[in-house]
Amino acid sequence: MHKVAVLTSGGDASGMNAAIRAVVRSAVFRGIEAFGVHQGFEGLINEEIEGMNAGSVADIIHRGGTILQTSRSEGFKSIEGMQKAAERLWSRGIENLVVIGGNGSLRGGAEFSQLGINVIGIPATIDNDVPFTEAIGFDTAVNTVLEAINRVRDTASSHGRIFVIEVMGHDCGEIALAAGVAGGAESVLIPEIDTDFNQVLEKINQGIARGKLHSIIIVAEGVYPAHQLKNRIEAATGHDTRICILGHMQRGGTPTAVDRILASRMGKYAVDSIFKSERNIMVAGEGSRIFSVPLQTVVAGELTPKLELYEIARMLSI
Ligand code: F6P
């Protein structure tokens, strides 16, 4: 009989619980023994492993965060740490490990697989920056940002203010772009494209000239410090400007239906692939299609920026 352990690693993302549930329940359905590892790779090294059954994952599909908790493990970066982690699994006869996380976690998983453990990756990160796939958690984060934009827009209109809203994304502009387009922002500043500050000002001034009551500027973290941007805008336009840094609220909250369904499909696919003796893959999803990509290909892959969305944001914000 097969055995599978599942862990969540790196920054959490809403929908991780739905993915854990799908892995555990699919395993039980297939007669595969399931284990949960607490605290990601760190917990694997420290032997925080427990058996899981259908009941262990009851009542979690709607919950944000991860019941298994997560970490960014330093110990796992050394070969000694990895070996220790592998021994923890071997000593229990567990030959498969499902890693739910973002790029760093999948990279760690790919390296770990070289020790002989079959690693199946499930992409989960609000940043949506894993090559070849959509990631669990992105849709929820974008909807959270949208909710915030709607609220800020109300007060911005009342006061005739400019707002700079900073969103997360590590070094990727996916959240900013999606929320910017869906939220009708005047400008979206992302790391993939050099900021043309004059263009940002032009948009604001054009808007004011034609009677717009507010301007919303979305800036991805790391592109430009929000307070500096505010000062520059205020100095150049003379208009009252405020900042709003959304921070970790983007990572929490109940997952959207899109994320729950994606997580359920990916979790099931992960266990199916173990059942079919597929090895060392990441489960990928794009639209209605769920497929596998070799982990090594994912690690070597590069993300293509969504320039189409950038263009749409630019065109529609006149
Ligand atoms: O990768 C997810 C993410 O939320 C990034 O968008 C952000 O840069 C980072 O994690 C924040 O990490 P931490 O929770 O360790 O502050």
Image: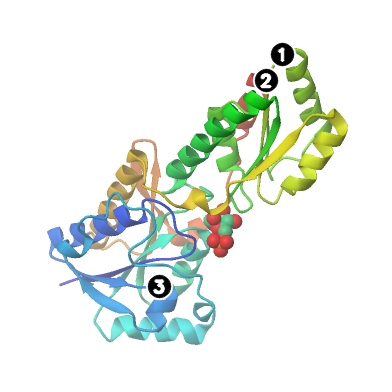
Q: Position of residue 81 (x, y in %)?
A: 47, 84
Q: Position of residue 277 (x, y in %)?
A: 26, 63
- Could you give the CA–CA distance between mark 3 and mark 2, rounded to whole angstroms? 47 Å
Seen in the image, is 304 located left or right of residue 286?
right
**Label 2 is placed on what type of residue?**
Leu
- Could you give the CA–CA distance between mark 1 and mark 2, rounded to whole angstroms? 6 Å
Reply above or below: 229 against 72.
above
Q: Position of residue 32 (x, y in %)?
A: 17, 67
Could you classify mark 3 by the number of other residues whose Cα lies within 10 Å: few (under 14), some (14-19), or many (20 or more)?
Answer: many
- Could you give the CA–CA distance between mark 3 and mark 1, rounded to whole angstroms? 52 Å
User: Image point 77% across, 40% down: which residue?
Assistant: 230
Question: Residue 215 occupies which quadrant of the picture?
Answer: top right
Seen in the image, is 131 located left or right of residue 200?
left
The quadrant of the picture showing ligand 1 is: bottom right
Q: Which residue is mark 3?
A: 39
On whether ligand 1 comes within 8 Å of the CB at mark 3, the answer is no
Marking on residue 211: 1
Question: Residue 257 occupies which quadrant of the picture?
Answer: top left
Q: Position of residue 101 (x, y in %)?
A: 44, 60
Q: Which residue is mark 2?
A: 213
